[in-house]
Image (cartoon, rainbow, N blue to C red):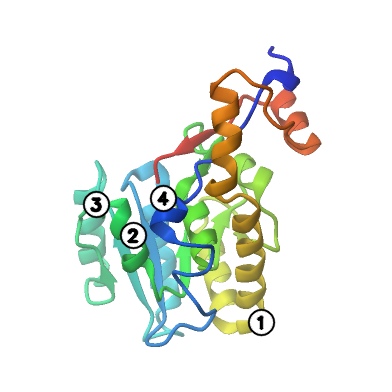
Amino acid sequence: GRRPDIVSVTLTVADDTIFGRPGEGSPSAHPEGPPRLVYHGTVARRLGLDIAVDAFAKLRPDHPALTFQILGRGDYSDALARKIRADGLQDAIDFPNIQVPVESLPKALAGALIGVVPNRNDPATRLMLPVKLLEYAHMGIPAVAPRLPAIAQYFDEHMVQWYRAGSPEGLAEAVNTLLNDPQRRAHVRAGALRFAERHRWERLRHDFSAASDGEKAPKPSLRVIQYREQRPQPSSDGR
């Protein structure tokens, strides 16, 4: 019910003082070493780690050197660890069940080939813009993500590889596309880096400070205003 012209939206983007300039943490679309998928952040069922593990299992026959690193912990950690063992994937999936401090994330994520955002489609995730996706974009790590409303509000097919939320088959196909097509991988990386450059915290913090001080912040794009009129304001995931 609030007027769009008095609403300001600030994204929880990567901090340049920690992550450096966009692209510095992952200087190439073709990292050296065995291909590695990565997920970092909260380990919760709503965030679809079981879906990601199922998708990874489908990829293994065609990509035996592929590994998957899961950095984080949460109320789904024990169940996830049991699933990894039950599926016989403990040698290929690295899940230390630890929360990595944000200051250590650039080093931990460096060299990853693909970032995985496996969120389910439910009330807790539809209007969530995952911070991890913004951090993958900033680091130049091509990502796969479900086409959920809040994510699709800010990202398009030039910035991310889409798949249908909740589908291990769809997630596996999206990862497979990026694994098998270096040109597509480079295209997604370049699009994500352009997004990160436009939305650097170095620039957004001035808008945030203006809004906090009661000054008139820059007007959001028409696309964002229309979305706000139709749906509740998206929330931001802690990762």
Q: Amino acid at mark 2?
A: Leu
The local secondary structure at tag 1 comes to helix
Badge 2 marks a residue whose secondary structure is helix
Q: Name the residue that disc number 4 marks.
A: 48
| Residue identifier under label 3 | 99
Q: What whole-number distance in Å separates the C-alpha atoms at marks 3 and 4?
A: 17 Å
At label 4, the amino acid type is Gly
Report the disc number at residue 105.
2
75 shown above or below 137:
above
- Please tell me which of labels 2 and 1 falls first in the chain: 2
| C-alpha span from label 1 to label 3 | 33 Å
Instruction: Give x and y (percent) for residue 39.
Output: 38, 60
Residue 216 vertical placement versus 70 (above, below): above
Task: Determine the residue positioned at 54% across, 60% down.
Answer: 137
Depth check: 161 or 78 in front? 161
Q: Label 1: which residue?
A: 183
Between the C-alphas of marks 2 and 1, the distance is 26 Å
Residue at the spot x=19%, y=50% of the render?
78
Q: Earlier in the sequence, mark 3 or mark 4?
A: 4
